[in-house]
Amino acid sequence: MVWLEQASYDLEAAEVSKNSAFYEWACFQAEQSAEKALKAVLVHAGWRPPKMHKLAVLMSYCNNANEEFRKTKFEFRDLEAFTFVSRYPFLVPGENLSPHKFIRLSDAEKCINQAKAFLQKIKALLNV
């Protein structure tokens, strides 16, 4: 399935970014991995993937598209928090720095771990 394949590549890219100390990109790439995994659920259910990036909204669509998905717990608070903060300066109050200067290794690790859990659970749900 193409969406899951790309989600896997995005997660791999997140690891490379983390290992190269580009923690902001690692966070963003991890979020992208989770987003594409969610879109895989929708495509698997016969839906067209929406052109949106909000994880909470995509989760809601997936709850409607797949009954087993609805029963699965996902943690995505960190992923969602870094969706925009990882890419644009001045989004965090009091931080007049580029994201590269205030996003840390621990942030990247949290995001990557959450994205890994997304991918594992969704692959299991879709039997791939």
Image (cartoon, rainbow, N blue to C red):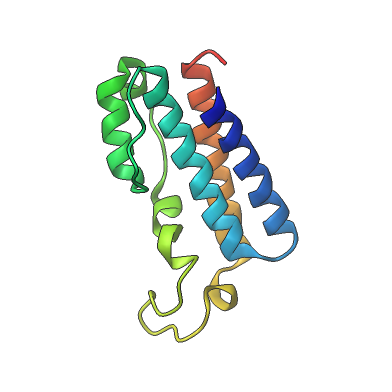
Q: Is residue 108 above or below residue 62?
A: below
The quarter of the rendered structure image containing the C terminus is top right
Question: In front here: 103 or 33?
Answer: 33
The quarter of the rendered structure image containing the N terminus is top right
Residue 64 appears at what percent x and percent y? Answer: 24, 24
Task: Please identify the quarter of the rendering in which residue 101 is found.
Answer: bottom right
Residue found at x 32% / y 23%: 47
Residue found at x 69% / y 50%: 15
Residue found at x 45% / y 72%: 88
Residue 58 falls left or right of residue 23: left
Question: In front here: 109 or 44?
Answer: 44
Give the number of callouts.
0
Residue found at x 27% / y 31%: 61
Question: In front here: 53 or 72?
Answer: 53
Residue 55 falls left or right of residue 127: left
Task: Please identify the quarter of the rendering in which residue 70 is found.
Answer: top left
Q: Is residue 97 above or below residue 118?
A: below
Residue 83 appears at what percent x and percent y? Answer: 43, 57
Residue 23 appears at what percent x and percent y? Answer: 62, 63
Residue 48 appears at what percent x and percent y? Answer: 34, 28
